[in-house]
Image: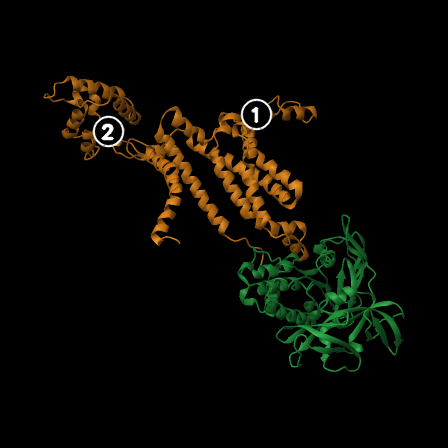
Chain colours: A orange, B green
Amino acid sequence: MSGSPIRSRISALLLVAPLFLFLAAFFVWPLVMMMTVSVTDGTVRAVLPETASAIVEWDGAGVPPKAVQDALVADLRTPTDQMAFGDAVRRLNSEASGFRTLLGRTASAVRETPPDQPVDLAVLDKRWGEANYWQALQRAMPSYTDRNLLAAIDLKRDTGGSIVADASANRIIMLRTFTIAALVTLICAAIGLPYAMIAAASTGWVRNVMLLAVLLPLWTSLLVRTASWVILLQNEGLINKALMTIGIVDQPLQLIFNRTGVVIAMTHVLLPFMVLPIYSVLLGIPRNLMPAASSLGASRLRAFRYVLLPMALPGVLSGSLLVFMVALGYYITPALVGGAEDQMISSVIAFFATGTANWGMAGALGLILLVTTTALYLVYGRLSRSPNMVGA
Amino acid sequence: MAPFIHFDQVTKSFGPLRVVDKLDLQVAKGEFLSLLGPSGSGKTTILMMLAGFEHPSNGAIWLDGTRIENLPSHKRNMGVVFQNYALFPHMTVAENVAFPLIMRGVGKAEAVERVTRALDMVRLSHLKERRPAQLSGGQQQRVALTRALVFEPTVVLMDEPLGALDKQLREHMQLELRDLHRKLGLTVIFVTHDQSEALTMSDRIAVFNAGRIEQLDTPEGIYDRPRTRFVAEFIGETNLFEGVVKKVADGIADVALDNGVLVRAAIIAPVEIGSPILASVRPERVHLQSEAGSANVIPVTIADNVYQGDHLRTHLSGPGLDLVAKVQRRVPVGPVGSTAFACFEPSECTLIAPSVAP
């Protein structure tokens, strides 16, 4: 006897609940946090709440009205957490240099003044008579900011608030990341397609050995595999020794700590993600299609071009997508076998996240990566849906 | 005149297994030849050798005076219809049919015109933009056939093309294929394990067993005058009696069966007096009578009556032999346990030399 519909529905929900909770806790929530942290900017606002609400009204010309100045004085009088104040000062200093000394001096001066006595900021420090410090203060006030996102693509807002170029290498590194990922994907496809074709066409132990050769690296630690490439590719390594012994080269080739090493090691690590989808697609292709093409007058090459290749293409596409997506996030391999010019965006993100604790920048770079990847995925979805036609 | 297709002492082995054994087979131009046999009898291998997907281990294959056994399949100009149609799933119907034309460098305009004409012929023009997966089995079958015919091949090879269709559609397609063969004057080699299919369509049938031809004859010859025990038992159903030839006179042989009954049979191949022989009678040739008639009469008891719709299958037990009769419904049959006489004409009884095992 099955229970009532409601009860069975509840038990069904209970069964999928762990999955939903897992996804929510370990995927959705971190993603949302990452996006939030990249656009949040509340440090100055938290320390100077009254100034924040007062300065909104100001039109940005000349010196703000007395009310704003009084609000700032009131805020500075209020004792705050030293750490939060430090953060706010750092944030303001990045908008306009000199804020560190300005705010520090003003704060101590304000606190030394008795509460009932008015403070004239311009007298305290003549820099308060200049518009750009007030403007910087106003720019730093909103709870949300686009400065991390802009910085992630080498842009910033100038004092007037318009977007201008910023001197930074993020774009180059992002471009390099995509170039390396694309190169690795291409090489994987070039090796993976013939490999999968031979594996799918062979039988018995040959097929098993070929599949094992693909799967074995998947079961080995990434670090171990990368380290073994160091052993193979270094100047005194197996490959250079072999090449010099048979006399192809006199000098050892520089195969490691440069782009070549990164591409070789990443291709090796990612090849299974290319071979396996192609292989499974090829297995699904009826065996008699190639003989059929041949009987209809197609030479081996044309049968491949018009029948096997179009039918294997979905496998190549999904393999490419997998390889490309995984390659974009590569971090250990470029760090171990690459040179300074081969570091990918992940290492920049790691630098911001763990090196400087700038979670805003780390989140912004991650967000840019996510958006570009999603865009590429959508393009892929469109491509893989369009039919492949032959002639007529 | 030289035969159009000639298998000259062709042998094909896979490792130690000899699948085709010294095959000698000649096919005339415009002929519809069926290769009929149980699975594993080598018939498909023969077709694959003709198509160029397999190569003979020994012997020669001639097509219209040219040796072709080493010619690659894409240069043989033969239309092949595969068991599961082998339509290209990523192409539309029209693209599938156009494929052989494009491979032959036919211009686009001409290709479109020929595809349209060919699809019209099988009444599929309205489906030409569909993918194979969107078609029914019968429609896929017709597309595969059209694709194999559109480039006007010299020979059409078919490997159990109707096997996946249901019975009604299969019978319909058999007639359609036969008409197409007659209309276009095609040379067709048709592989099947379905005897009724072979009997319906063929000019001649080659019955295969274990890599050898048991009998190569017209459908009537195969059915009415089987020459080996295998053919008699594989094609249709038959009653076989073992005996010895006693007398030969006026084209009629007297055969003494092992149980003592004397059977008279028409001679179609020379027989020797005293030699052991098999007598074969088709169940539908056996009549049940209440009194002994002329020719061959065997007194029997009705063991079982099986209702088959259009006829009654009657199992009879006689003196030391069992036989089966197919009785038309309008003929009255006694109840189980009653006695009758099983009769058949000498002309409807075939003599078969006991096979020397191949």
Sequence-first tag of 1 and 2: 2
Q: Is residue A33 left or right of residue B310?
A: left
Classify the position of the C terminus of chain A by image quarter: bottom right
Q: Is residue A138 left or right of residue B225?
A: left
Is residue A62 in view from this perspective? no
Q: Is residue A340 left or right of residue B207?
A: left
Q: Residues within 10 Å of mark 1 (few under 14, many from 20)?
A: some
Q: Nearer the viewer, residue A40 or B43?
A: B43
> What residue type is disc 2 on?
Ala
Could you tell me which residue is drawn at 63 percent across and 73 percent down? B308
User: Label 1 lies in what chain?
Assistant: A
Which residue reaches farthest right? B273
> What residue type is disc 1 on?
Val
Q: Residues within 10 Å of mark 2 (few under 14, many from 20)?
A: some
Q: Nearer the viewer, residue A42 or B284?
A: B284
Residue B165 appears at what percent x and percent y?
A: 60, 64
